[in-house]
Image (cartoon, rainbow, N blue to C red):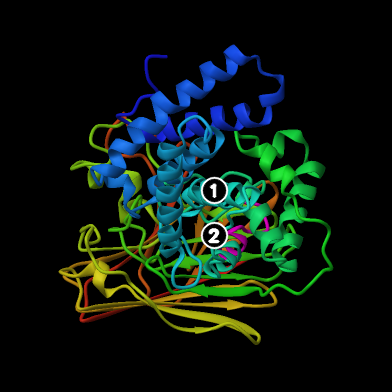
Amino acid sequence: MKDWNPSHFLDVAEMATAVATGYDWLYPSLTPAQRQTYSQALIEKALKPAKHIYDSNGWWSRPRNNWAQVCGAGIAIAAAAVAENEPELTRSLFESGRNLIQKCGQFYQPDGMYSEGPTYWHYGSNYHVMFLAAAAALGEASADDPILRLAGDSIMHLTSPTRLSYNFADGTAGLETPSPAQSWLAVRYQDAGQAQHVRSLFQRAWEEGRGKIKHDRYFPLSVLWLPAPAEAVPRSNAAVFLGEQSMALFRSGWAAHDVFFAIKGGTAAASHAHMDVGSFVFDAHGQRWIHDLGAENYNLPAYFGNKRWSYYRLQNRAHSTLEIDGKLQDPSAKPSPVTRSTLAGESYEATLDLSAAYAGSAANVIRHASFDAGTGATKIRDEVTRPSGDVVWRAFTDAKPEIRGDEVILRKKDQEITLRKSPGSGTWSIRDAKPPTTEENQNEGISVVTLTAAKADRVKIEVEINP
């Protein structure tokens, strides 16, 4: 290869990590000519281009998003692998990587939630811990960062009893098999709850069949770092995270058929974010009933540019939240917080102030959720003050919906759940989830359960979800 595609430096960092790992692990078996070929490729195609970016303060050399973790760690690992060949260059790049990775700890502040969503939690965190593991192997362990233990908690709570994550932002809900970061963090911090969670996910994946195990290029490290069996410890069934993408996550338990409800505040202004402020997912009977549709095709024109908010899947119209007066959420709004929560007792509760996301279409928007800790029955109450038009409530489902008076029955695989509106909450309708263009994902098999409330000085919508 003439180069490793430095115009998209993630490619360089991933290639550097792979070649450096093979070079280091297989070094005794390589011929002198092979060692020369691979070490020179690392130096010329990865390390020297990276040095130029660090020296010119290139954008990924600052802690802005997952690129900083992937590029900083990948280049540092490559530098360590060939340190004897170019001592000055490699030492400089290793130290630059160390400094960058340490700064990336801010991505998990204040309590462990990663603002780019669980898909990028795995991607960025895998490289983050690969650097820490490499540094430890070299006897150069970085200072312990307590936020990483909380990061392990966040991804644990984001994974539902169905093994599907709450895939907010640019992510897709797939059956979770623990990533290297999860395994490594559980061991590093000797966290029995995380270790129990990691091993239980592996056990379930094994029992459900090889096709249910997510294999990717990092999978071997998940196994190599797998925590030892840990004594069973109680894990909380409720958690709230108060960072840039604030959210509440409730469950009736940790077994495969327990009920799971997750709801977020946050902002569309974060990296990889959608207009999903107020959106939620709901799992019961071993299945997901109310979905986040996930990311759209990154190769669509200006997906990360000036057309981003024209794509259906990224809009609030394609999330289980509100649309007011036919308007989109504010893409630059400050984060909408969880303002109150109850995480113990017979009912878990969370109140989210979504007003910032709806600036210009309502004076105040408050969404309150309560979750019965025993049954999983969930109530969502919206209070909208002075909306500029009708208020539309939505839930996205792959079940077959049927309106029956105040209820909507959702059925699939011989199971059902019900959505019940309170009197005066509006009018039910069922629509498809097709986007306005054929280039976008057509969302086949997805229906939108819609509840429309007429404009009024104060609009109150209440819906109860009964598993």
Q: Which mark is residue 131?
A: 1
Compared across the picture, whether 336 is left or right of 199 comes to left
Question: Which residue is identified by label 2?
Answer: 142
- Tell me the amino acid under the disc marked 2: Ser
Q: Which mark is residue 461?
A: none
Residue depth check, mark 1 versus mark 2: number of the one nearer the observer = 2
User: Quick check: 269 above or below 88?
Assistant: below
Q: Which residues are magenta?
A: 154-164
User: Under tag 2, what secondary structure?
Assistant: loop
Image x and y of residue 414, in percent? 70, 49
User: Quick check: 232 above or below 85?
Assistant: below
User: Under tag 1, what secondary structure?
Assistant: helix
Q: Residue at x 29, y 29 (%)?
A: 7
Q: Residue at x 50, y 35 (%)?
A: 78
Q: Quadrant of residue 270?
A: bottom left
- Tell me the amino acid under the disc marked 1: Phe
User: Quick check: 21 above or below 231?
Assistant: above
The answer to which of 151 and 74 lies nearer the viewer is: 74
Q: Are the residues tagged 1 and 2 within 8 Å (C-beta)?
A: yes
The answer to which of 95 and 395 lies nearer the viewer is: 95
